Amino acid sequence: PVHIERQRTWDTTRPGEQAAAKVRLPDEGELGENEVFVPAGWFVAGGEPTTAGGFDSRRYWCDDFAVQRFPVTNAEFLVFLNELIDSDQEEVALQIAPRERAAGAGEQGSMLYERDGDGRFTLHADAARRGRAVDPDWPATNIDWHGAYAYAQWFAERTGQPWRLPTEWEWEKAARGVDGRAFPWGQTHDPSWSCMQDSRPGQPHADVIDSFPIDVSPYGVRGVAGNVTTWCLNPFSLDAPEGDLLVAPEGAPGADDPTIPRVGRGGAWFFPPKFCQSAWRFRFIATYRYGFLGIRLLRPL
C-alpha cells in the first residue's frame, strides 16, 4: 500500500538516513504459510483521540516485518502447554493455561481446557461460551499477558526465528495499512464484515479464525476488526511515541512486574463498531484474562 497526499510525494527515506531506501521483497520461501509481509515505510497512526491515550493522526516509520495471518488457535496453544507437560513443567503449564477470570485477587479461575488420564491438556465444552464447544480453530483466549509472552518465547525457540508479541504500532500498521483508514477495509462499518456484537442473531460469540473474509488488512492479515483483541508487547502509555522512527524495545520492559498495564489492540466478538476501529487502544492489567483477548505473533525481518 502507498499513500500519497495531495501535492506530496511517496517518501522512502528512513528517519535518520539520507538516501531513499529500496523496497525490499522477501525471498521465495522466506515466509511461512501463516505469515504475511509488511514492508518498511511510512504509515499513518492514530486519529482516534477519544480512545484512552488517543492522539491525532500522524506519520511514523516502521521497519519491515512478518506477522501471523491469523491469531494463535486453541490447537496451537495446546501444543505449547503439552510440551511444558512433557518437559516436567506442569506448574508452569497450570499457571499459563487459559482460565476464567477469578472471583478475587490472587485466586485462580477455573481452567477452560480439560486434562486427560496422562495429564495432557484437551478441549471441552465451555460454560463461559454458553455451552458451545471450544473449537480447535477458535482463537486461544483467557490467557494473561505473561502467558502470551511465554508462548512467544517458546515459539521463537521452537522455530529458531525471532518471534515475539507485536508492539501496538506494528500491529496498527499491519491492521490498517498506510493511509490511516478507520477499519482494515476502509472508512465505513457493516456488522457482517467482522465478528462483533451485531454480526449474527442471538448471543455473540467467537468464531473460527478464517471466518469473516472481509475482515482482512491491505497486507492480508485476517481478523483484526473482530473476533479477538490481541496482547501487545509494550506497556500502555498515554503519550504518543516520540520521533518518527518506531523501534521495538529490547525484550519486554517490565515483563516481571504484573502491575504494569499492557496494550491490547483489535476488535472482538462482542465489541460495538467504535471499538473495532484500528486506532482504538485498550489498557489491560497484565494479569487479567478475558474471553476476547488472545495472541498474534510477529517477527522482524
Image: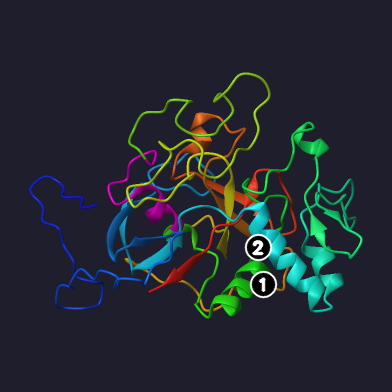
The local secondary structure at tag 2 comes to: helix
Callout 1 crowding tier (Cα within 10 Å): few <14, some 14–19, many ≥20: some
Residue 77 horizontal/vertical position (percent)? 68, 60
Residue span colored magenta? 171-184
18 falls in the magenta region:
no
Q: Is residue 161 left or right of residue 286?
A: left
Q: Nearer the viewer, residue 182 or 148?
A: 148
Q: Nearer the viewer, residue 66 or 251?
A: 66
Q: Is residue 140 left or right of residue 34?
A: right
Q: Amino acid at mark 2?
A: Ala
Name of the residue lying farthest toward the left? 7
- Residue 18: x percent and y percent? 16, 78
Decide if residue 243 is on the left or right side of residue 22: right
The residue at which mark 2 appears reads as: 148
Residue 145 visible? The answer is no
Q: Tell me the distance, in whole angstroms, between the alpha carbons under discs 1 and 2.
A: 11 Å
- Asked whether the beta carbons under mark 1 and mark 2 sit within 8 Å of each other, the answer is no
Specify whether residue 173 is painted magenta: yes
- Residue occupying the point 48% across, 45% down: 224
Residue occupying the point 37% across, 44% down:
47
Dot 1 or dot 2, earlier in sequence: 2
Q: Mark 1 — residue?
A: 255
Q: Residue at x 86, y 71 (%)?
A: 91
